Amino acid sequence: MNAFTEKRIMPLVNRLHNDIREDVDKDPYMKWPMDVFAGEPERIRTYVAERREYLTERLHQL
């Protein structure tokens, strides 16, 4: 139950996000402004936190 945590996931998310930033900025097919891309790690962090909370609640109901 420790694999899907912000502490485990976010370093990977941040590293990958930084690794592709330049290429995304140069992508002629990018449909959204770069500020949308810049906010993606926070969106993922929120998802991880909310999903973990949901799953924890459901596990306790079993």
Image (spheres, helix red, strand yellow):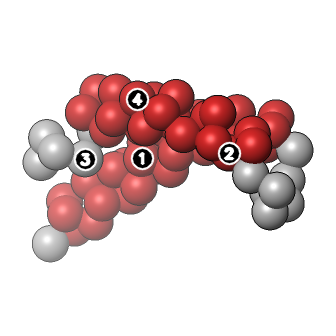
- Residue 25 sits in quarter: top right
* CA–CA distance in space, label 2 to label 4: 14 Å
Do callouts 4 and 3 mark residues in contact (Cβ within 8 Å)?
no
**Left or right: 62 as drawn, with respect to 31:** left
Front one among 43 and 20? 20
Between discs 2 and 4, the one toward the N terminus: 4
Give the quadrant of the C terminus.
bottom left
Res 10 seen here: no
Front one among 27 and 2? 27
Number of the front mark, 2 or 4: 2
Q: Which mark is residue 48?
A: 1
- Residue 55 sits in quarter: bottom left
Q: Element type at marker 4?
A: helix
Q: Element type at marker 1?
A: helix
The disc labelled 2 sits on which kind of residue? Val
* CA–CA distance in space, label 3 to label 1: 7 Å
Between discs 3 and 1, the one toward the N terminus: 3
Q: Residues within 10 Å of mark 1 (few under 14, many from 20)?
A: some
The structure residue drawn at horizontal position 41% and vertical position 55%, both measured from the top left corner, is 51
Res 43 seen here: yes
